[in-house]
Image (tube, helix red, strand yellow):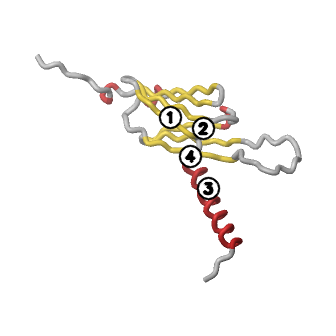
Amino acid sequence: MYRTLVDEMVNFENILKSFNSQKRRMGYPVVNAYETDDELKLIAILPGVSPSDVEITFEKGVLNIKGEKKNDKQNDHKYLREERNYGEFSKSLMIPQDIDVNSIIANYKDGLLYITMKKQEYAKTKKIEIK
């Protein structure tokens, strides 16, 4: 069948909407993770989010970060283009190490959420010397 340019544009727009909704579900907040001998460390990038609007929980090996990025519009402008995202977000991360739940600490500075988790003694790598 014959497809018009308008049909193609609508199809392309639907593909973009689908991609953007998947990105929102999967990609926010962006998290970097690394480990030291004693700790696991995460850095979540949360610009424009107040620490009081973020909740962190840890249950059964899963770290959950959820919160809300509030709309900071303070005017009634009709925007020609608006790319900033607002609304609720959540991210769940499987933690591959056994950690000391009581040692989890979180700090927030300049739009970055720092989470530090100490490894359990038995989860640490230990080199055994042969005698």
Q: Are marks 1 and 3 in contact (CB under 8 Å)?
A: no
Q: Which numbered tag is attached to residue 27?
A: 4
Residue farthest along the right direction in this orientation: 76
3 or 4: tag closer to the N-terminus: 3
Q: Amino acid at mark 2?
A: Glu
Residue shown at 30%/28% (left/top)?
122
Q: Amino acid at mark 3?
A: Ser
| Spatial separation of the CA atoms under disc 2 and disc 3 | 22 Å
| Residue that carries the numbered disc 3 in the rendered image | 21
The mark closer to the camera, 2 or 4, is 4
Mark 4 packing: few (<14 Cα in 10 Å), some, or many (20+)?
A: some
Q: Amino acid at mark 1?
A: Asn
Residue shown at 78%/40% (left/top)?
72
Mark 3 packing: few (<14 Cα in 10 Å), some, or many (20+)?
A: few
Question: Residue 97: image x %, image y %?
Answer: 37, 35
The mark closer to the camera, 2 or 3, is 3
In what element is the residue under mark 3?
A: helix
1 or 4: tag closer to the N-terminus: 4
Question: Residue 30: image x %, image y %?
Answer: 56, 40
Q: Is residue 50 left or right of residue 66?
A: right
Mark 2 packing: few (<14 Cα in 10 Å), some, or many (20+)?
A: few
| Residue that carries the numbered disc 2 in the rendered image | 55
| Spatial separation of the CA atoms under disc 1 and disc 4 | 12 Å
| Residue that carries the numbered disc 1 in the rendered image | 32
Q: Are marks 2 and 4 in contact (CB under 8 Å)?
A: no
Residue farthest along the top direction in this orientation: 131
1 or 3: tag closer to the N-terminus: 3
